[in-house]
Image (tube, helix red, strand yellow):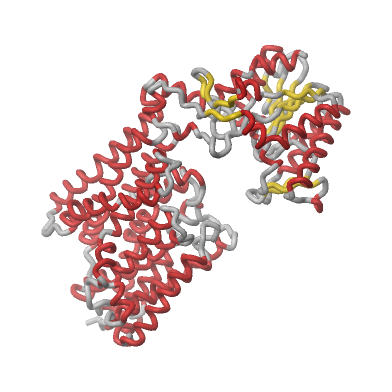
Amino acid sequence: MAHSSPSAIQSPVHQNRRDDIQGLRAIAVGTVVAFHAGLPVPGGFLGVDVFFVISGFVITAMLGREWAKDQTLRFSTFYARRFRRLTPALALLVVGVVVLSVFIASPMGDQQVAAKTGIGALLLSANIVIAKTTGGYFDAPAASNPLLNTWSLSVEEQFYLIFPLVLFLGWKLARKKTTRFMPFVFVGIVGAVSFAIAMLEAAGRTIPLLPSWLSGFYGPTSRAWEFAAGAILALFAFKIEPAVSKHLGLVLGSLGIAGLALSLYLVNDQTIWPGPLTILPVVSTMLLLAAGYAQSNAVSHFLGRSPFVHVGNISYSLYLWHWPFIVFALMLWPTVPGIAVIAAGLSLVPSLLSYQWLEQPIRNLRKVSKRKMSVIIACTMIPPIVLAMGLWNAADNGFWNTRVQQFIATVQPMHAGNAAGCNKSIAPSDRKATKCVWNADGTGTPVYLIGDSHADHLSEAVIAATKELNDPLTIDTANACPFFDVYLHSTAAPKSPCRAFVQKTLTWLKQQPPGTVILSSSSVYWNSKVFSAGLTKDSLTNEVDAKRHSLQSGLKSTVEQLQASGHRVILVQDVPYFASPYASDPHQFSVLQIASGENLGTQMPRSFADQNQQAARDAIDAVGEKTGATVVDLRDHFCPKNLCTTQLGATYLYRDDGHISIGAAKTLTSLFAQTLRR
């Protein structure tokens, strides 16, 4: 008979339920909710990491008890329990979010993303879907995904899918005396590899052959070490539990609480995560779990008090529901003070109802036959997936409503230059000769549309105007890169190829047949501290007056070089920028708002727009006067009667607060045709 090692078969934890763990769950969900509600808890999102460590500990302890009792693991039973514990509540959430999204969310991406994320969440892959559709956790698009929080649930479920197999293999091999440490070895290897991946990525290193969607913030490979930390603690319970006295428990618990509290204020949305600082909340959670072996200590006793336990009991439901409540509330009432906090508080209602009337009854079912389990799975999975697919299809088709379809066609698509791949910081000399050229056989004067995204958003107007005049047109633009002969640095993109793009494109233009160069750029560079500018690399500065001098000098130099090469230059004044409190985003409009046919436009005094953009306007006028370049001011078009608007007649003019729509660009065709004729 094979030798049975005590460390391989002994139950890691004698108690099935510990109130202090429920209290720790309450703290974890509380920090996450506070962070999402905008309260001053900068590192609140690390509550998810606390959950991961708890899950590794609890699941390993539970499986350890089963192994100690029967020397085997019943995988079908384990997965069925996990399904009943997690999926029905998730399915209800997805149904609720899909239904609310129909009436509240935008059909220009938000509804599709919500539907895709809901399907991904039910199929254990929300983290992958979110990484591919929504982007970074702290990026702007994340704020409009009402199911963003399900990423962590998918990571946890992926852990549940794989980790029992690792433990099973380890315990199987541990039946022999020489291999009794195999469970620790297997879990340790998984944890060590995952930790190495997380730290290498935090240091900016790329892991060969590892897809980006499997790593990073949402990735299971960079998070598995957190589960493994809890699992190791549970595996060593037979050694740790007898050694933890009341006094030692108090010390461990106090250190754990202090570590978590410190983490919440050392960490913020600029911290590389997961990264070196993630060690602090993970270790702190392990200390609190270890302290709980002596529950008589003051810290564990405090965590086990009734209020904490009650919140811990509903922590899963509260985690699910609080985020969509906040997202939808901000969509409906973005200017109401404290609306996120109010929404978070109201999310307690569905959380309590879900826990009491759905989670607990299904979770506590006894003697669930395979047939009954099949019915539960079907009834849980099919309705939300069908609803989510229906929303996805409806949004993609503008809900088969003419007004909605026309609005989307006007506002959502990329401009022609961008769609053709001509807005990628690639100079014409580095492209095929026919790339980014329209009306190539035209016999008129060559036209070149050059600049940043505010040149690209004029694409439709210039393409139509040059076609009318039979002029060949080349479009070449680069995001966040004004076509000025300066050195430019952006804190948002420190390795931008802007300077190389400008120099190469300027050289190329000098070699082309004389024509008309249309230069258009955003006015943001003149005021934003994000951008530094200088006539030399050593003179870069974001001090406003010095930077403005460099930008104006750089623009004048560019114009003079182009004119010296025989080109006529047209300088386009930037369109009005709808800054706060007049900021407007058409992607926030719901289907009902669009379909109603009401005027959705925002109005802003022209004087307000002029004041915000005065530096850029004055500089362009000055350069035009000094060089003789033509200056085109679009302000009269967008600000009739000195009142700027985002909607004229049936045409919505803006894609966001600073870029105009395709519909607006088309209305500028005659203006550019007249300007080019002169």
Q: How many marks?
A: 0
Res. 169 in view: no
Q: Residue at x 74, y 39 (%)?
A: 501
Of residues 274 and 199, the one nearer the viewer is 274
Q: Is residue 68 left or right of residue 237?
A: left
Q: Is 336 located above or below residue 171 in the figure?
A: above
Q: Is residue 237 left or right of residue 437?
A: left
Q: Residue 226: horizontal and vertical position, in percent?
A: 42, 67
The quadrant the N terminus occupies is bottom left
Would you identify the image quadrant in which residue 591 lies?
A: top left
Q: Residue at x 80, y 42 (%)?
A: 549
Res. 311 in view: yes
Q: Is residue 410 left or right of residue 574?
A: left
Q: Residue at x 79, y 47 (%)?
A: 546
Looking at the image, the residue that sits furthest to the right is 564
Q: Residue 507: horizontal and vertical position, in percent?
A: 82, 35
The quadrant the C terminus occupies is top right
Of residues 635 and 8, the one nearer the viewer is 635
Would you identify the image quadrant in which residue 405 lies?
A: top left
Q: Residue 40: horizontal and vertical position, in percent?
A: 46, 59
Q: Residue 332: horizontal and vertical position, in percent?
A: 39, 38
Q: Is residue 174 left or right of residue 404?
A: left
Of residues 105 and 573, the one nearer the viewer is 573
Q: Is 366 located above or below residue 150 in the figure?
A: below
